[in-house]
Amino acid sequence: MTVIERPLVETVRRPLGGGRRLAMPQWIAAAPFFLYVGIFLLLPTAIVVSGAFIDSAGLSLANFATMNQRFVINAFLNSVLLSATSAIIGAVFGALLAYAVATGNPNGAFRRLVSSACGVLAQFGGVTLAFAFIATIGGAGFITLWLQQHGMNIYANGVWLYQLRGLVLVYIYFQIPLMVLVFLPALDGIRPQWREATESLGGGTWHYWRYVAGPLLAPAFLGGTLLLFANAFSAYATAAALVNQGSIIASLLIANTLTSEVGLANPGIASAFALVMVVIVAVVMVLYTLLQQRTARWLQ
Amino acid sequence: MSRNRRLKLQIFRLAVFVLLGAFFLIPIGAMFEFSTRGVTEDAPRTLNAWLTIAQTPDLVAAILASLGLAVLTSLGMLVLLVPTMIWVRLRLPHLSRVIEFLCLLPLTIPAIVLVAGLAPIYLWMNLNISDSILTLAFVYLVLVLPYAYRALYTGLAAIDVKTLAEAARSLGASWITVMMRVIVPNMPVAILNACLLSVAVVLGEFTIANLLNYVNLQVAIALAGRANATVSIAVAVASLLFAFILLVILSFFGRPRARVAPDAPGLPYPGAAGGGMR
Amino acid sequence: MTTAVAAAGVGTAARAGVEIRLENLRRRYGAVTALDGLTLTLAPGELVALLGPSGCGKTTALRLLAGLEEADGGRVVIGGHDVTGLPANKRDTGMVFQAYSLFPHMTAWENVAFGLQMRKIGAADRRRRAMETLELVGLGGFGNRYAHQMSGGQQQRVALARALAIRPKVLLLDEPLSALDAKVRARLRDEIRRVQLEVGITTLFVTHDQEEALAIADRVGVMQSGRLEQLGPPTTIYARPATPFVAEFVGLTNKLSGDVRGGAVEVRGTRIPLVQSDVPDGPAVALIRPEAVTLTSSAETSAGPLVGTVIATAFLGATSRVTVDLGDVTVLAQLATSEATSHPAGTRVQLALRADPVLIARETSGATPA
């Protein structure tokens, strides 16, 4: 019976169900997505990568020759310095703030407020942030004027807000909240039982931090610092709004090489710089992801 | 916990909140202060700068352009991402890693790098299709991918998509009906989150617009800053307030649920490299 | 064999258990009284289980003993020493938590060795003792595993080993089985008891699972609202509950309405003596164990206050629980399975109530049938 029935059902079903539609591969539905991402994400990336290796004479490494020049090396070194400093300071203060939040009531309104504010402030940057600091400690800034009235001058040794030091201070403003956002989940993963187990096994606060909480949080802290580094390294808008001239950091250098107003624009060289930047950021992000996975295993 | 330790902890917390609270609030307060200054140092407080915004056609045009971009980008994001993600979850699970990778990729490619590759593409588009500022929506959609992807992923992870779809299919629903009438209505918060995040990213975008020579909101603020600092700071405060309201709405809707998802993908948080406003 | 050898290794150094006294312990959290003057003495080597619903104060008692909370009043005495003012890390207690208490970045043996490290014991010694203790709990080959590489049951064994490795004066078990599934739970329960007896350590075991408490403990203390309702051997707790709360919390109970007169209660024509002496005459609800109900076949036509129809039989292994519908109430009877099979669902049966003394439920009015 069954042997006869099967083919019958099949032959009946085929025209009804629309054999042609079944034949269409299912990935077709995902094709628009791949096409779109291909054109507006992968193609520009490919243009950057290939552009870095092509100059007027065809395939060449000439674009990278510029990397030797003093101002290029300085821009990249400055970027590393700025990113590392703002990442470390941001990570330390962010971790402290996260700890202060995590030790409060986990369902309290205050915690909700702080984490919401961090969500907003971590996204806060660019022109608006630059202006906020100009309004605060710029030449006519609120703090600057107030201090002047009290006989103090924060710019006694020159105006540093528009230099690397100023950028560090301004970047910290979005680095701290970002650290809170990535570090808070790790702190929440720390179970109160671990502290109690440490105590009942004879350990004190020092032992707890040295042998239990410290090693457990180290990957999350290090990972957070790396993320902050990448975050600062690839930032452009804030610096562009704050620094009017010169290419003191890598992202400004790329922008200025790309669209130089005095006609020195060189897309090939800009692509080479961009490629170097993307490689650095990618390496940092891979390390970050690895550390994040370890954290997830310990502190889910 | 011993009472002594609890006291020390409370003092520590208070110190941290006060110090960092000052660091974060003073610049925002200073912007308000700055935007209400009079022309001279001892002139009385005035809202002139705020009123000037509406009388500056360039600013108004830029604001409208940015709002238009925000709407276009959000719509495009929904059309492109929602059906793809649902379909991949239902029928093409082997592609989910690829989709995730592609969606999170813009976090690793800084906007400043992307713009170097976009320049020739936009040059071609300007000549052959349109040179409207609204074409920026194409690339903004890429910028919002990571944020939108994570918001939608969280929403999808919270519902049993497969069972819902099987139930609907067994009742005779077509795949389109399954998506639009069964799955999408079950993730309103995720869709709202994805849209709000997209709007926030678009309104804060400066890098790409500036380097492709378009004047969006942020570029206009920067330009206005050269002419009249007070007005530009007033616009900056206004745009900040707007973004703040959007993101507060978002965080009150979204965060608690986000923590339910057991295996939210990859990079844990929006702020990561490249995207956003900076 | 291996276990025996390892046990000897631990056993030689293990001291005989010490006496533990909790004297009039009190603790409040804001408006909530968690402990309302708890007094409890554990004999050396004894395992006492504190049993009660959540919020009854059993966990608070354990945490006060561990030093993880500070008492508002009362004393904790371990082996003759008053430790009330000592912090947790000076008390020499070994504690096993509900779950997830292993340090996730340490292997099993590093976890077990942690307490020894706190006691400044040399690295080689530490490792040897940790391995021995892991053998004791039956995890000899698991020393190098991390928590995420072990099952929940294995993790709790490591936690037990970690608590025992420091040779504490007292072992504290805070619902150590509640996160495990039923089968593992029963096996680990017996394993904990075996190890506890081998080491001879005085143990306080906190649980909300009555079966667990009755199976493992020398004595069970049933708690409610921060007070000890009854303390006694498991058999007494079960068979002779001192208060209605204990009767209802431990084991299944039929609630049958009856009439109290002259120190006895008449339930559906059967006179049963009372445990309590202070029950006023009048209508009351008697608490009757399913084991005190027997049944015999009855003719279809017969009638009476204790004649009814079997409506369901739950097979529990050696015994079965039979549900009988008496028309106005249903009654549970627990009998040998061989006996229960002769009364399948639908048969008419005659019940009999054994005349063991019973308790009267607190809410004497409004006879709610069980």
Image (cartoon, rainbow, N blue to C red):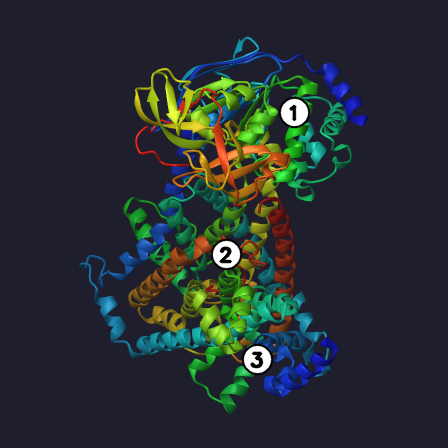
Q: In the depicted view, which residue is nearer to us: A37 or B132?
A: A37
Q: Where residue B234 is drawn, which disc sits there?
A: none
Amino acid type, mark 3: Pro
Q: Residue at x 49, y 62 (%)?
A: B155
- Please rate how many residues cluster around mark 2, counting C-alpha atoms within 10 Å: few if below 14, some from 14 to 19, many from 20: some
Disc 2 to disc 1, C-alpha distance:
67 Å
The N terminus of chain A lies in which quarter of the figure?
bottom right
Which residue in the protein does label 3 denote? A32
Q: Is residue C114 visible?
A: no
SS label for mark 1: helix
In x, y percent, where is residue B49? 25, 67
Which residue in the protein does label 2 denote? A164
Disc 1 to disc 3, C-alpha distance:
64 Å
In x, y percent, where is residue C129? 74, 24
Which residue in the protein does label 1 denote? C193
In x, y percent, where is residue B159? 50, 61
Q: Residue C214 lies in what quarter of the image?
A: top right
